[in-house]
Structure formats: structure tokens, C-alpha cells
């Protein structure tokens, strides 16, 4: 099979025209949402259960940082090859489930771990399998959605991650406080099997009807600009943006318990749920706003830039956190911050589909590698900074600098560097 083969003209939408065929791409998006929900639920379980795990294995802040970063490092380096693999795979119908089952098994086995190193190695395995999810989802969205809808589609599937962060705190804390933290890994890992049902029912090996979007039929214009200025710009934006996302998913529970002195109980779960729900709104509204602007005559690129600039302004509220004393004020600022972060993230995912339409998975994976390496470094170093300084204030300042650098690159980004069809 030749490198960078065009997407298959089969294994896509139902052969018969009609309501279901016309709306098939939204049903596929639903399965991508569910896969991303599982993807984040499994990785989020450890960060929420880190308190009882640390107590059982006697872990300090540095060991916590290494354990949380193990997944992120493996996830990052797996992106170096997973995109090339996905762009060559013809049978996505079975490749995707193999990856989901792989990360689900890695999660279940954490519940059987007897040593700190066992969890560490399983987190490495989890990172490798989960690295396939976002390139696969972005590839499928690029095939079946027109450009003006991709920010919304990216926001919807990406919101599966935030729905997972809504559910994970309540479930994991419930098992950890009433039974043992190990049950939470058994339950979350087992959910991956259930995903097979809707996926195999919706994504079937049938020919594409004439009514399907052109992108779904694999009619892409060959690209020779994979590593052009568009690629490097999107990668640079992600390097500055994603550490903020990973801080919220990996360190937020520890921030609330260590800096604010909140108890590890269901009240903590309720507060986390509020913050992550606001993040979910940002993904949907940040993507939907681009569609709204394009329907009023603005170009796709200009629409995305306007949404991102607004998101950046909201994200700068993170600099207020060191000055706040009440828990309510901190929660309010965190909600504002994550709303802006999510609105930007929805559009960052859409940009990855416009660098090279014929190689979406490769671009998404390579950009994801750059994004996740910077995030892994931050996730690990947070523990060292907290232990040395006694707080998170320096981390908030660093994130603000990173976001500003990403915004500068975004404002320089030109339409000719992308292939927004």
C-alpha cells in the first residue's frame, strides 16, 4: 500500500438515500463523542483518584507529578507514528475498536496493580492506545463535514472529553470513599466494550451515496505542503494552548485540595462538575459561533480568529487566582477561564483538518505530539514547582505567557497557508 493513500471510498455512509443518509455524519459524530468520552474518562480516573492512591503507596508531590505525566509522555510520543498508521489504514471500522479496547484494558488492569510501578507502566500503555482517538476523530470529521461546520463538529466530539470530566469526579470519589479506588478503574475500563454497539451499527462497510458530502468520498486534492507554514503555525499555537487544557484535566483536583484546603468528598466532586460543565459549554458555543459568523458573510478563518481572541480575553482571568481568597470567587474565575479555553480549543482542532485534507490524521498526530510534549513537561514540573514554592501561582503566570504567545502566532496566520476548502 502506497504512503499517504487517499481515504477509502467505502466503509462510510449507508447506501440508501433518505433522512438517515442525509444526517448520517451527525450520527457518526455521536460515536466520536462517545469514544472521546471514554478516552478522557479512562485517563481522568487517575487524576481524580490520586489522593487515595498516594495514601496507599506513600506518594509525595514529585511522585504524583511523575505518575500523572507518564500517560502524557507516552501519549505524546505515540503521536509520532500513529497518524501515519491511521492515514494508511483502510478498515477504520475495526481499527478504531481495537484502540478503544486496548485503552480500556489498560485502565481495568490499574485496578489490580500492587505497586506504584505497575500503575506507571499501565499509564504508559494507556497513552499509546489513546493517542489514536483524536487523529481518528478529526480524520472522520474532515471526510464528512464541510469547513464551516468543522469547528462545531470538533467542539461537539471534543466535548466528550469534558462530559467525562463531569462524570469522573462523582463516580471515582464515590467508589474511593465508599469502597476502594480500584473499583473506579474496573467500571470505567469496562465501558469501552459497550461503545462497540453504536459504532458497529452506524459505521458500516457500504458505499457512499451521491448525497454524501464530497469529503466523505475521499475526493481530496493531493497536498505537497504538509510541513509548510500552516503546519508550523498550528503546531506553535497548540504548544502554547494545550498545557492549559492538561493542567485542568490533570491537576485541578489537586489544586482545589492543596491550595484551597477542600476536603476530598462529594462536595469537591460537585465543584469539579460545575467547572467542567462550563468548559463543555465553551466547546459547543465556541464551535457554534464560527458557524454563526460564516452564515453572516465572514470567512471561516476570520470567524475562528474572532472567537479565539474573545476566548483569550476570558482566559487571562487566570491571573486573578493568586489574589482571591474565597472559594466562590476562585470557582467563578476558573469557570470563566475554562469557557474561553474550550472555545479556543474547538477551533484549534478544526485548524488541524485544514493543513492537508489528504493527511488529516498525520497532521493531527504530529501537531498533537508537539502539543502534548509541552503539556507533559508542564504536568510533571507542576509537582516540583508546588513542592518548592508551596503554591500554584507561578504556574498560572507561565500559562498566561504561553497563551499570549499562541495568540500572536494566530494573528499572523494567513489563509494561503491553509487549505480551507
Image (cartoon, rainbow, N blue to C red):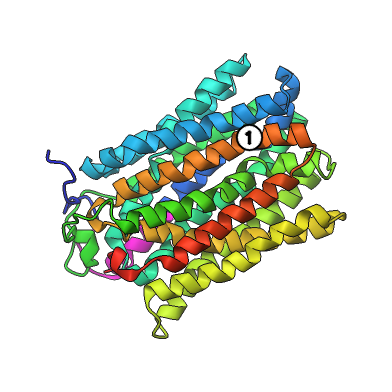
User: Would you say the magenta stretch is mainly helix, strand or loop?
Assistant: helix
Residue 29, image x and y in percent? Answer: 39, 57
Residue 376, image quadrant: top right
Considering every residue shown, the one lying at the far right of the view is: 325
Magenta span includes 17: yes
Q: Is residue 55 in sight in this rendering?
A: yes
- Examine the rendered structure and indicate whether residue 197 appears above or below residue 219: above
Instruction: Return the residue at label 1.
Output: 381
- Asked if residue 330 lies left or right of residue 279, the reply is right
Residue 78, image x and y in percent? Answer: 39, 34
Q: Magenta segment range?
A: 13-30
Residue 200, image x and y in percent? Answer: 33, 45
Magenta span includes 388: no
- Asked if residue 134 lies left or right of residue 90, the reply is right
- Quadrant, the N terminus: top left
Q: Residue at x 38, y 60 (%)?
A: 351
Residue 12, image quadrant: bottom left
Considering every residue shown, the one lying at the far top of the view is: 114
Residue 17, image x and y in percent? Answer: 22, 68
Q: Nearer the viewer, residue 319 or 346?
A: 319
Q: Residue at x 47, y 70 (%)?
A: 305
Q: Nearer the viewer, residue 41 or 130?
A: 130
Q: How many marks?
A: 1
Secondary structure under badge 1? helix
- Examine the rendered structure and indicate whether residue 363 appears above or below residue 379: below
Amino acid at each position: 500500500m502506497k504512503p499517504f493513500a487517499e481515504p477509502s471510498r467505502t466503509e462510510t455512509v449507508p447506501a440508501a438515500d433518505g433522512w438517515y443518509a442525509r444526517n448520517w455524519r451527525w450520527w457518526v459524530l455521536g460515536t466520536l463523542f462517545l469514544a472521546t468520552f471514554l478516552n478522557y474518562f479512562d485517563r481522568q480516573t487517575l487524576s481524580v483518584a490520586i489522593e487515595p492512591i498516594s495514601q496507599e503507596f506513600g506518594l509525595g508531590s514529585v511522585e504524583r507529578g511523575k505518575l500523572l505525566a507518564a500517560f502524557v509522555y507516552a501519549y505524546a510520543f505515540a503521536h509520532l507514528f500513529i497518524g501515519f498508521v491511521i492515514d494508511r489504514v483502510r478498515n477504520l471500522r475495526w481499527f478504531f475498536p481495537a484502540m478503544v479496547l486496548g485503552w480500556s484494558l489498560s485502565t481495568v488492569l490499574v485496578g489490580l496493580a500492587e505497586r506504584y510501578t505497575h500503575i506507571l507502566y499501565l499509564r504508559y500503555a494507556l497513552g499509546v492506545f489513546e493517542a489514536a482517538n483524536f487523529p481518528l476523530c478529526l480524520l472522520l470529521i474532515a471526510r464528512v463535514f464541510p469547513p464551516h461546520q468543522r469547528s462545531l463538529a470538533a467542539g461537539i466530539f471534543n466535548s466528550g472529553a469534558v462530559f467525562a470530566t463531569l462524570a469522573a469526579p462523582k463516580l471515582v470519589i464515590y467508589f474511593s470513599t465508599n469502597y476502594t479506588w480500584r473499583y473506579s478503574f474496573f467500571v470505567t475500563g469496562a465501558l469501552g466494550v459497550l461503545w462497540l454497539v453504536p459504532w458497529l451499527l452506524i459505521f458500516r462497510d457500504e458505499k457512499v451515496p451521491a448525497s454524501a458530502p464530497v469529503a466523505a468520498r475521499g475526493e481530496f486534492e493531493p497536498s505537497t505542503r504538509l510541513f509548510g507554514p500552516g503546519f508550523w503555525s498550528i503546531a506553535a499555537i497548540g504548544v502554547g494552548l494545550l498545557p492549559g487544557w492538561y493542567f485542568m484535566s490533570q491537576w485541578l483536583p489537586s489544586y482545589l485540595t492543596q491550595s484551597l484546603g477542600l476536603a476530598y468528598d462529594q462536595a469537591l466532586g460537585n465543584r469539579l462538575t460545575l467547572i467542567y460543565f462550563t468548559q463543555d459549554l465553551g466547546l459547543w458555543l465556541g464551535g457554534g459561533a464560527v458557524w454563526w459568523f460564516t452564515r453572516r458573510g465572514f470567512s471561516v478563518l476570520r470567524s475562528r480568529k474572532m472567537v479565539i481572541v474573545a476566548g483569550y480575553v476570558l482566559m487571562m482571568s487566570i491571573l486573578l487566582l493568586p489574589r482571591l481568597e474565597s472559594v466562590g470567587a476562585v470557582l467563578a474565575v476558573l469557570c470563566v477561564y475554562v469557557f474561553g479555553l474550550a472555545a479556543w480549543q474547538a477551533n484549534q482542532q478544526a485548524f488541524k483538518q485544514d493543513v492537508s485534507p489528504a493527511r488529516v490524521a498525520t497532521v493531527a498526530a504530529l501537531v498533537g505530539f508537539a502539543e502534548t510534549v509541552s503539556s507533559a513537561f508542564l504536568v510533571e514540573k507542576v509537582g516540583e514547582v508546588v513542592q518548592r514554592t508551596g503554591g500554584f501561582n507561578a504556574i498560572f503566570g507561565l500559562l498566561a505567557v504561553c497563551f499570549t504567545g499562541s495568540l500572536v502566532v494566530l494573528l499572523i496566520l494567513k489563509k494561503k497557508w491553509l487549505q480551507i476548502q
